[in-house]
Image (tube, rainbow, N blue to C red):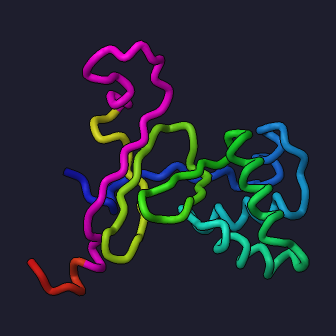
Amino acid sequence: MASMDDVTLTPPAPDAEAAIRAVGLRVTTPRRAVYTALATMPHARADEVFDRVRDTVPGTSLQAVYNVLGDFVEAGLARRIEPSGQPGLFELRVGDNHHHVVCTSCGRVDDIDCVQGAAPCLHPAHETGFRIQVAEVTFWGVCPDCDASSGDT
């Protein structure tokens, strides 16, 4: 089985303005700042994005950041994930049906590609009548840093 270091990530579009326009949103200073923050902080909480945006766009409110994040999610530019027992997290990696692994010790979240390759998780074992569009799988475990620091083997 591949390690998390072997996971290939899809980088976000390098140009915030082009990415925002591509999903039909108007480019604004707060949207550019939120996009840039998400590009450097995958799996970020809204308050973490706000802390970054506040440094570059003084006067921006936490509510404005939530509004921008909501616009991004609705437009398909960002994805909100909600690991059990944790606040919602936002990422720019969308459209590839990837999953997540969460450290039960420190809360670190990493991307993991679909477990068996080309999205077989979109085909349930039994017929439900639903047309499946996305599957969200969350793996829980201990990250390498926490595992090394625990001294348990």
Residue at 79 percent across and 56 percent down: it is 67
* Residue 101: x %, y % from top left: 35, 57
- Where residue 121 appears, as percent x and y from the top left, is 34, 31
Q: Nearer the viewer, residue 28 or 9?
A: 28
Asked whether residue 153 is drawn in magenta, I would say no
Whole-percent x, y for residue 97 in the image: 46, 38
Q: Residue at x 31, y 23 (%)?
A: 124
- Given the current orientation, which residue lies at the most extreme front position? 85
Which image quadrant is residue 111 in? bottom left
Location of residue 95 in the rendering, given as x and y in whole percent from the top left corner: 56, 37
Q: Is residue 123 left or right of residue 97?
A: left
Image quadrant where one finds the C terminus: bottom left
Range drawn in magenta: 118-146
- What residue lies at 54% left-to-right and 64% top-to-bottom? 87
Classify residue 104 by image quadrant.
Answer: bottom left
> Is 139 one of the magenta-colored residues?
yes
The image shows a total of numbered marks equal to 0
Residue 7 shown left or right of residue 13 in the figure: left
- Dominant secondary structure (helix, strand or loop) of the stretch shown in magenta: loop
Which quadrant of the figure has residue 64?
Answer: bottom right
Work out whether 49 lies above or below 72: below
